[in-house]
Image (cartoon, rainbow, N blue to C red):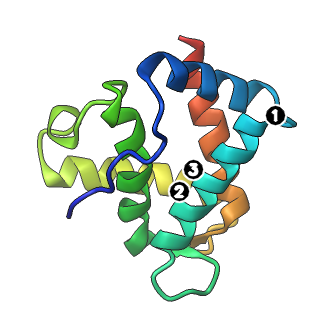
Amino acid sequence: MSCPVNTFNKSKEDFIWFIKKATSDRKSDAHSELYQALLKMFVDADTNYDGLVSRESFSKLIDIAASIPRAYGYAPIDTELYKTEEEKNAARTKMFESMDLKKTGVITFDEWYRFSMEHIAAKTAT
């Protein structure tokens, strides 16, 4: 599966500034832009258009989201992260379950947004 090309159109330095601003100031234009990007990713992964992302579509959502920091060299590719496809699937299942707090087998945009903001903020803190 191919991942989308980086559409943020920012330099590496601008990307870091943008991400830090977006996660620290929820009233900023940067936050609005990030929110819209996360929403578009979620909608693109919602394969049956019911406003939810299933466990089956979740890996696509992560691939889309990871393509942006990967474009800037801030996230490793899957083959560097996981030795096998089974290891990747297990990690993605664990990640999905950490978002699916009600154990419904699907995640809402709110669950995706909350997870993403916490994950991004943690990554930029280091």
Q: Give the residue at x 48% y 71%.
A: 44
Q: Give the residue at x 82% y 28%.
A: 25
| Rendering quarter of residue 59 | bottom left
Q: Give the residue at x 71% y 24%.
A: 21
Which numbered disc, 2 or 1, marks the residue closer to the eye? 1
> In terms of depth relative to the viewer, which is nearer, 73 or 57?
73
Compared with residue 43, is residue 19 higher up or lower down, i.e. above or below? above
Mark 2 crowd level (few <14, some 14–19, many ≥20, 10 Å Cα): some
The reply to whether dot 2 and dot 1 touch (C-beta < 8 Å) is no
Counting from the top left corner in percent of width and height, residue 22 is at: 70, 32
Counting from the top left corner in percent of width and height, residue 82 is at: 19, 39
- The three-letter code of the residue at mark 1 reads Ser
Query: Residue at label 1?
Result: 28
Decide if residue 98 is on the left or right side of residue 69.
right
- The three-letter code of the residue at mark 3 reads Ser
Decide if residue 51 is on the left or right side of residue 24.
left
Mark 3 lies on a secondary structure that is helix
Tag shown at residue 97: 2
Q: What is the distance, in whole Å, between disc 1 and disc 3 at their CAs?
A: 28 Å
Q: What is the distance, in whole Å, between disc 2 and disc 3 at their CAs?
A: 4 Å
The reply to whether dot 2 and dot 3 touch (C-beta < 8 Å) is yes
Mark 3 crowd level (few <14, some 14–19, many ≥20, 10 Å Cα): few
Of mark 2 and mark 1, the one earlier in the sequence is 1
Mark 2 lies on a secondary structure that is helix
Q: Give the residue at x 49% y 42%.
A: 8
Query: Residue at label 3?
Result: 98
Mark 1 lies on a secondary structure that is loop
Counting from the top left corner in percent of width and height, residue 64 is at: 39, 55
